[in-house]
Image: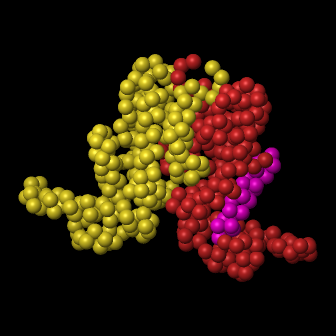
Chain colours: A red, B yellow
């Protein structure tokens, strides 16, 4: 973007940017990642191809930013300004249940589901894209779990010898697999149960 | 297949069947599910299209059986004749660690990885195929975990109020997500840790 855009140009840019994001997300949902091209995004958004190349270097770039923007918009709608935030009320089980319930809602948000599936599918077979999306989109969310679990360790709610990077997978991975592979239904009751089992273990106490 | 094949016909059939499985798995790995066709499988296997239609109704069918056969061959190589079996020695942690270590080996078996990724990716975006593969390929494996966890409940090693269908996801889903999405490295040490965390929980005892 130019260093100091005139106010009108900036508004025009913002409008184009939104149109490009919407076009990219719609196309990847409808035709899959391989068939989505900079050309088809430009045509759908009603902008010139050069407009896209001015701001992004590849379709992966456009889609990544479109996705980040989707998350920011969802957070803005919730009004907390904290995309994917995990509360820290001191009650670890309650905080994890709350964030997982919000994740369930997001996974079934129609604006999110189809493009998220298209990108996740491509990431499974396309290692470079997969790693890029994990680094930019998934990793920041996992970091929030690491931080929340570390805080729980400081408070004595999680054993000090537990590796938070592994432990977070008990909350994140079962839900991810049910969603990605449709192995079983998803509900709040289910994610609540994950939290209880993970914190207190399966063996008798 | 004919009711009573002559020995020669049966040998020929067996050879064709193997060639078709190998062609189907190679093609889906190389070109993805959408571009794999009955025609391209037939051409690669060096058989007529009608030979395939005699035994299977669709490419999904061929691939599913090719995959089941891959599992049986892997089990035969291991010599235990038990595909995806979970031992029941009475030591739940040791049994789960053993089956997860075997799963790690399988996930990185070059014969398995590329076609498995291609099919998993397609299942993410193609609900019908995804559900078919879960029902035929994944569900029987999950059932083994349910059975092993029920046996552990009978033996007092797992709390009686735990739902084995949910609990098994602590062993299966983190590994599945690391493999599908390449969120972090996979090792025996990692899967061993999953077992310990899941059985004893994250909270202090």
Is residue A22 in sight in this rendering? no
Q: Overall secondary structure of the magenta stretch?
A: helix
| Residue B29 to residue A169: above or below | below
Tell me which residue sits at (68%, 62%) in the image.
Answer: A64
Viewer-nearest residue: B105 or A149: B105
Decide whether residue B99 is among the magenta residues.
Answer: no
Q: Is residue B45 left or right of residue A31?
A: left
Q: Is residue B112 left or right of residue A83?
A: left
Viewer-nearest residue: B109 or A127: B109
Viewer-nearest residue: B106 or A51: B106
The x, y position of residue A93, in whole percent, is 68, 30
The x, y position of residue B9, in whole percent, is 12, 61
Tell me which residue sits at (38%, 25%) in the image.
Answer: B89
Determine which quarter of the picture holds residue A96. Answer: top right
Q: Quadrant of the N terminus of chain A?
A: bottom right
| Residue A56 to residue A186: above or below | below
The x, y position of residue A180, in whole percent, is 53, 51
Tell me which residue sits at (37%, 64%) in the image.
Answer: B26
Determine which quarter of the picture holds residue A162. Answer: top right
Q: Is residue B180 left or right of residue A42?
A: left
Magenta part of the chain: A59-81
């Amino acid at each position: 973007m130019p260093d100091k855009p005139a106010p009108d140009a900036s508004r025009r840019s913002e409008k184009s940017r939104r149109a490009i994001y919407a076009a990219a997300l719609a196309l990847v949902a409808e035709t899959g990642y391989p068939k989505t091209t900079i050309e088809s995004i430009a045509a759908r958004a009603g902008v010139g191809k050069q407009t896209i190349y001015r701001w992004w270097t590849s379709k992966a770039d456009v889609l990544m930013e479109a996705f980040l923007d989707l998350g920011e918009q969802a957070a803005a709608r919730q009004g907390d300004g904290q995309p994917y935030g995990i509360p820290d009320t001191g009650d670890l089980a309650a905080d994890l249940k709350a964030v997982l319930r919000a994740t369930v809602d997001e996974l079934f948000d129609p604006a999110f589901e189809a493009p998220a599936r298209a990108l996740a599918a491509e990431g499974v077979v396309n290692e470079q894209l997969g790693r890029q999306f994990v680094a930019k989109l998934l990793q920041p969310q996992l970091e929030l779990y690491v931080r929340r679990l570390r805080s729980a360790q400081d408070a004595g709610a999680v054993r000090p010898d537990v590796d938070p990077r592994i432990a977070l997978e008990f909350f994140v991975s079962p839900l991810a697999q049910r969603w990605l592979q449709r192995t079983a239904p998803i509900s709040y009751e289910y994610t609540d149960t994950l939290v209880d089992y993970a914190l207190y273990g399966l063996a008798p106490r």
